[in-house]
Image: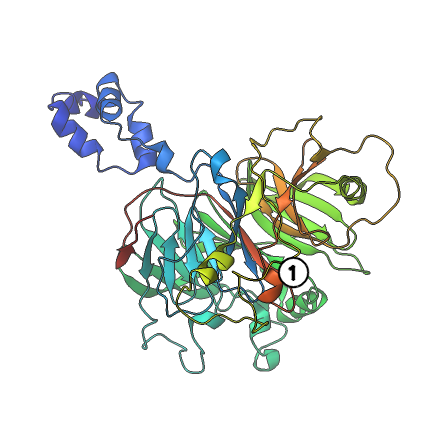
Amino acid sequence: MMEEPAARTNELPEDVLAEILRRLPPRSLAVSRCVCAAWRSAIDTRRMLRTDLLPLSLAGIFIDFLDLRFPELFSRNSRSSPTPINGKLDFLPHDEGMYFIMDHCNGLLLLPGLMVANPATRRWARLPPLPSHFAGQKGVKGFYDQEVFLVFDPTISHHYQVFMIPSVNIGRYSTDRMNMASEWPSSRLLVRVFSSMTGEWEERPLVRQGDAAGTVTDVAERMSRLASACIDGNVFWRGALYINSHCVIRISMSDRKYQVIKHPMIYNSKQQPDIYIGKSEKGVYLASLLGTECCLSVWILHESGGHFEWILKHQNNLKPLLRCLNQRKQVHGPWISQDVNYHLYSQKFPGEWEIYDSNYDPSHFQSPNDIDKTPVENNFEWDSDDDSVVGTQGDIEEGNVGGHIQFLGFHPFKEVVFFSSLYGWKGLAYHLNSSKLQYLGNLQPKHYEYFSKHEDICRSSTYTPCWMEQFPGISYYSTR
């Protein structure tokens, strides 16, 4: 009878066993801990399994504001946060221009200049340029014009991948040279992938499973209808990358296959809603938002036997909640903006700064939008006596709703949706299960009106910090 592996390894000295187990990634280490008492003892006594280093908590929301050089971090005040995060990206090279977030995944940010950065550990790496021998390089303007996506799962490995997918969005190409009756996307999709394990780019063919989204004509017409809507978001979930475009593209990391998942039937003839996907408590979620009408619908992606279906989770008109919230005089909230750009400009951080008021001096000027950001404790519990939380009960007076609301992201671990309201620059959290709306705080950056003529939010990213010090590639470190 063959001897069990656990029995054989139990004959090893504990120090030797520990050295073997130490080489396992966190997910495998957690499984190994359940094999037998000896393995569990070797792992626990040496504190190998450090779940506190993994991206298992929400630290805040990185927000890219129009014309600001750095993203702002909207988060709990550091005095009320158990693990405060410094949102400044001042450890990156000074000679770069705008540091907007191109993508994010499990604590890592993908930034312009072919850079991947970890704000928690303040480590970063610059990716090499695309090889000149790649097929179809003629006429390609470069990395910045491509759809790029970051894939990182620290429970499996400290290595990451960057996917460049120039052909997912058919709107980037002229259809004159295409057969308008041919299917889209094609049965074989060629993508470019950088792996930090090899340190190199490669061209990787993906094979489609299942049906296409339609013909080129069908997809072009659908994208034309969606031209005025915001279609954004992507998710890395259980070994697959989900990309939101005219449909959702699911790319499996294990077998190099991809699938087309059509959006749920959410379109109407009057107005096209904004469509976002993200990760939340039960997996992949899709939010449909008519921002001016304040109508929200949320679906959860359900998988069974390789087939995918959108299940409607929640639907509500948020106007009554916004109207009720706007009637309350609220100055402080549990979250604040870290005012990254204001502080870096005040400290004369090197590089070019675009200031629309040439007389602006932060030491002399005071903005009417400066607000005393008094810290307030917040643990995301819904207290009915809290003035910052409103529900649908009670009489609601007619009045100003507050205009347009904008989607900021899903809470990655709770069924909560984040919004911004340009009426008073409010940061809001909406709980899907209780239909309650919470005022988080003022998210407008300090002295923003001196940096931009058209104050607006370009993009947002919910941020889950990863504290693992291992960072592959040519990395750099700056003291926190």
**Total of numbered circles in the picture?**
1
Q: What type is the residue that disc 1 sits on? A: Cys
- The image quadrant that residue 43 belongs to is top left
Farthest residue, direction top: 37
- For image coordinates 44% across by 36% down, the residue present is 56
Q: Nearer the viewer, residue 37 or 319?
A: 319
Q: Nearer the viewer, residue 360 or 337?
A: 360
Q: Is residue 34 left or right of residue 176?
A: left
Residue 121 location (% of width, % of height): 34, 47
Q: Which residue is mark 1?
A: 230
Vertical placement of 432 versus 289: above or below?
A: above
Q: Nearer the viewer, residue 271 or 343?
A: 343
- For image coordinates 28% across by 28% down, the residue present is 32
Residue 7 location (% of width, % of height): 18, 20
- For image coordinates 45% across by 82% down, the residue present is 139
Residue 95 location (% of width, % of height): 37, 70
Quadrant of the image containing the N terminus = top left
